[in-house]
Amino acid sequence: DIVMTQSPDSLAVSLGERATISCKSSQSVLSSSNNKNCLAWYQQKPGQPPKLLIYWASARESGVPDRFSGSGSGTDFTLTISSLQAEDVAAYYCHQHCSIPWTFGRGTKVETK
Amino acid sequence: EVQLVESGGGLVKPGGSLRLSCATSGFTFSNAWMSWVRQAPGKGLEWVGRIKRIIDGGATDYAAPVKGRFTISRDDSENTLYMQMNSLKTEDTALYYCVAGLGATPLDAWGQGILVTVSS
């Protein structure tokens, strides 16, 4: 199984400041079929289902604010919130869908400082 | 508007069974890979299993903890996804999400979830 290791577990950031979340996979999630990374990021607010933010490691889902960006390749990935807004308080999960079983990171809780 | 509405959850004793349903609308169900993802209370996300499109053979895959106990199926004529859950264990207690792969990823659109509680 591909293990997804997220860090940190939680993060307190001042409004308007940058938040950075790391996700490392135990094996490469670069797909040989299309040379894209099978890596997605989800945001989950309390009491709500997860919402897709980023797919193929760096493509922003339609409607997602451009302060959210994803980067990385192979085994090392990053989700960056360039200027934290109050509505960004949530848990964030990375996810790989290259290899069965699909797996998620344990999540990172982002709060305001 | 894409909608996925789960039903069939509830309280069941260990060893019991439940059948979850997911009624969908707003997209072409037959074109979507469909999955179940669960979340134990206060915990993270865990992929449960997936069923491919019928034109892809309708193959299923499952996570190890549920393999042999859970069965995912689909009815494209009713735009509905199912999951038969047998031999339930206390550790299966979770909010179960129905998830559709609409093109960007296999897990694009999520339902609100349905709670399954396994307890004596």
Image (cartoon, coloured by chain):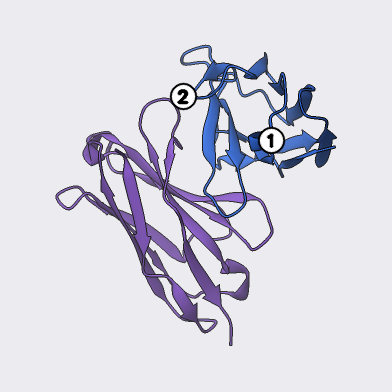
Residue B1, placed above or below residue A20: below
CA distance for labels 2 and 1: 17 Å
Q: What is the residue that sits farthest to the left in this orientation?
A: B77
Q: Chain of mark 2?
A: A
Q: Residue at x 47, y 66 (%)?
A: B69
Determine the colour of chain A. Answer: blue
Name the residue type under label 1: Ala
Residue A87 seen in the current view: yes
Q: What element does badge 2 sit on?
A: loop
Marks counted in the figure total 2
Say whether residue B87 is left or right of residue A5: left
Specify the label residue B40 is tagged with. Answer: none
Nearer mark to the viewer, of 2 and 1: 1
Quadrant of the rendered image containing residue B84: bottom left
- Look at the picture and state if A4 lies above or below B116: above
Question: Which chain gets the purple colouring?
Answer: B
As rendered, which of A37 and A67 lies closer to the eye? A67
Find residue B11 and report its horizontal and vertical position in percent.
Answer: 49, 79
- Report which residue position mark 1 lands on: A86
Chain letter for the residue marked with disc 1 in the picture? A
Mark 2: give few (<14), some (14-19) or many (20+) Cα within 10 Å: few
Q: Position of residue A93 (x, y in %)?
A: 65, 38
What residue occupies the far top of the structure in this picture? A35
Say which of A74 and A77 sits in front.
Answer: A77
* Residue B68 position within the rendered picture, expressed as x and y whole percent measured from the top left: 47, 63
The disc, 2 or 1, on the residue closer to the chain's N-terminal end is: 2
Which residue occupies the foreground of this view, B84 or B12? B12
User: Which residue does the image show at 28% across and 49% down from the upper left?
Assistant: B24
